[in-house]
Amino acid sequence: MSIAKVLATAVAAGALALPLAAQVEFRYEAIDVDGPADPWGKSAGDLDGDGLPELLVQGNGGDLVAYHPPDFTRETIDAGGSFSTDLEVADVDGAGGPDLVVIAVGQLRWYEAPSWLPHTIDDRTLHDVEVADLDLDGDLDLVARNQGGSGNEIHLYRQDSPASWFHRSLSIPAGEGLALADVDGDGDLDVVVESRWIENPHSLDPGATWVQHVYSTTWTWDATFVATGDVDGDDRVDVVLAPSESAGGSYRISWFEAPPDPTGLWTEHPIETAVETVHHFVGVADLDGDGDLDVASAEMHQGADPDEVKVFWNGGSGGSWSKQVLAASGSHSMRLADVDGDGDVDLFGANWSGPHQPVELWRNERGLFADGFESGDTSAWSATVP
């Protein structure tokens, strides 16, 4: 019997559903069933130089810890703290080793490797932080934002030295969410929030003007998780938005197509048209290895059940999407990283509160299906059974 006839018979019988885009097996693993209490912040980065990223978790009612692969040995970096929603791995002091930039409750600080000595940057309540050399002077700077009514400012921190930071703020509409990307292709990183991006003038000096460009008038939800990437493969930076707060609302997940001139309005393309407004994670990566960017997202546990952890497979140029649900128990502020060094991107996260708080990993197992059966790519198959 020909392969085509086998497939047609299986589909007709309901035994096989050919996906719109390739789907991948993800293997679930509970990294720590008793992790830091209320694990608000998650990150990933190679702390020990072995080529594999450590998984970092900080608890609002617990410790800041690192899990070292491959066996995820737990290291406590700061015990008994009160930590908030974001942290990043970066060489803050230029010493060649990865330090940590951490939002704690009411404070922005960095931890110096390898002793993990904490240094205060600012006493301020914040929700999001990103790290980059914003003014291209060779050291790392910070951009941060709070949420809700206090999310009406972008906070810029110019590093004059690891012990001295110049702060200035930019007024924006209140909201939540933050990303960095070179939107205009001029070699520096711009700031992206919901509905607008802010052009980096290569300077963090007090008089430097950061021009704001509205890219969408159709997206009106202010509490938003923001991700960036070239979704349609045209070598321009696109934006993906998900509504992140609060439970009970209904909105959508969309990507926004950048035009040749990014200062104009961008085209919105819905990915999922009706979702509860508790999607406190969205990320982009080529999860199936087909050369285009897919989208991952997760609902917080306080949403109406099921609380999906899911992947949207890009059918090509962002024109069509198919959804694969990995779990129904929720997650929050997840991270995408190649945790096991096998060349594909995995997902890890944890619910920020509630009865289900293990640190969880979904291992991408796409290498197991190189024959194309799982993805639907039968180009390497023979036409008949010998």
Image (spheres, rainbow, N blue to C red):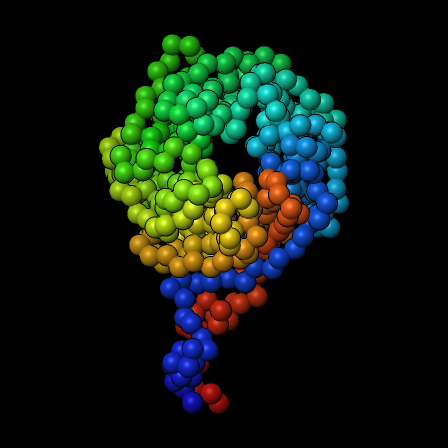
Q: Is residue 25 left or right of residue 355?
A: left
**Position of residue 316 measured from the top left corner of the image (x, y, whole percent):** 34, 56
From the viewer's side, name the closer residue of 235 and 131: 131
Q: Is residue 101 visible?
A: no
Examine the rendering and report whether any part of residue 332 can be seen. yes
Q: To which quarter of the image does residue 96 belong?
A: top right
Is 297 on the left-hand or right-hand side of 5? Answer: right
In the figure, residue 61 lies in which quadrant?
A: top right
The residue under the point 37% across, 44% down is 251
* Rendered-image quadrant of the N terminus: bottom left
Q: Residue at x 36, y 19 (%)?
A: 210
55 relative to 229 in the view: left or right: right
* Residue at 42%, 10% in the rendered image: 206
33 left or right, relative to 347? right
Q: Nearer the viewer, residue 17 or 369?
A: 17
The front one of 170 and 292 is 170
Number of on-image labels: 0
The extreme top residue here reads: 207
**Residue 165 versus residue 308 in the image, above or below:** above
Q: From what the image shows, is residue 354 above or below residue 307?
A: above
Give the answer, above or below, for where 137 lies relative to 88: above
Q: Position of residue 300 (x, y in %)?
A: 53, 44
Which residue corresponds to the image point at 43% horizontal and 54% vertical from the top-left?
312
Measured as percent of width and height from the top left, residue 43 is found at: 59, 38
Q: Position of residue 86 (x, y in %)?
A: 56, 32
